[in-house]
Amino acid sequence: MRTFAHERLTTLASAASVPVLNALTDQEHPCQALADLLTIKDHFGAFEGVRLAFIGPANNVTNSLILAAASVGMSLVVGCPEGSEPSEAILSEAARISATEIEVVNGAPSAVLGADVVYADTWASMGDGTTPEEAAQRCAAFQVNETLMEQVSERAIFMHCLPAHRGSEVTSEVLDGPRSVVWQQAENRLHVQKALLRWMMREAH
């Protein structure tokens, strides 16, 4: 089910006699996170020792990445503007899953320092009522550009769940650059969701 309000999903799931798949809500985007994990595993071969930096205001993708990172033991830091941090509920759930390092900072340079994965998403998340102008003013210091990417590890890659807004959360130089794996990441959504459907149909029978 792909919807806005997360409560619609939980209401349906509580009454359903078959598995219900969260294809996206305003709180979480687990299908995207699974595709992201596949992309990272394909590139690095393992999650151990990989540090992911999410840059920009926390949103549904951030939430699912935090839970995914905690599940596989991958350290993650969120670099976001003040007032747009992940919820305490998500951070508490991640801590319950494992003792994996999950950090939140209010700056981009400190977040990406030594990062192996730099991840960006749109500055105006679904349903938050933020205009593009307001988002640009709030998040200008959180653009992923070549200067910011100078702080990352030598093996670092850039990820984005797409569609990207060139010149806003990421520059074209980074999006189209040699570190970018966004097209592989997008393709992996297809593979992950096929696997999910197969697993769900097996579970339903």
Image: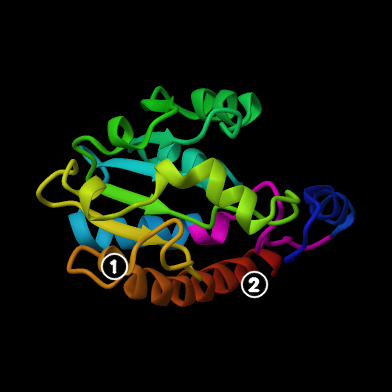
Give the position of the C terminus as an image quadrant: bottom right
- In the picture of the structure, the residue carrying the numbered disc 1 is 181
Query: Is 54 displayed left or right of 41 in the figure?
Result: right
Is residue 46 visible in this depiction of the protein? no
Is residue 27 magenta-colored?
Answer: yes
Is residue 10 magenta-colored?
Answer: no
- Name the foreground residue: 83 vs 51: 83
Residue type at the position of mark 2: Met
Closer to the chain start, of discs 2 and 1, is 1
What is the distance, in whole Å, between disc 2 and disc 1 at their CAs?
Answer: 31 Å
Q: Which mark is residue 201?
A: 2
Residue type at the position of mark 1: Val
- Name the foreground residue: 132 vs 11: 132
Question: Which residue shows up at 77% across the image and 62% down it?
Answer: 3
Question: Which residue shows up at 48% across the image and 77% down it?
Answer: 190
Q: Position of residue 177 (x, y in %)?
A: 22, 69
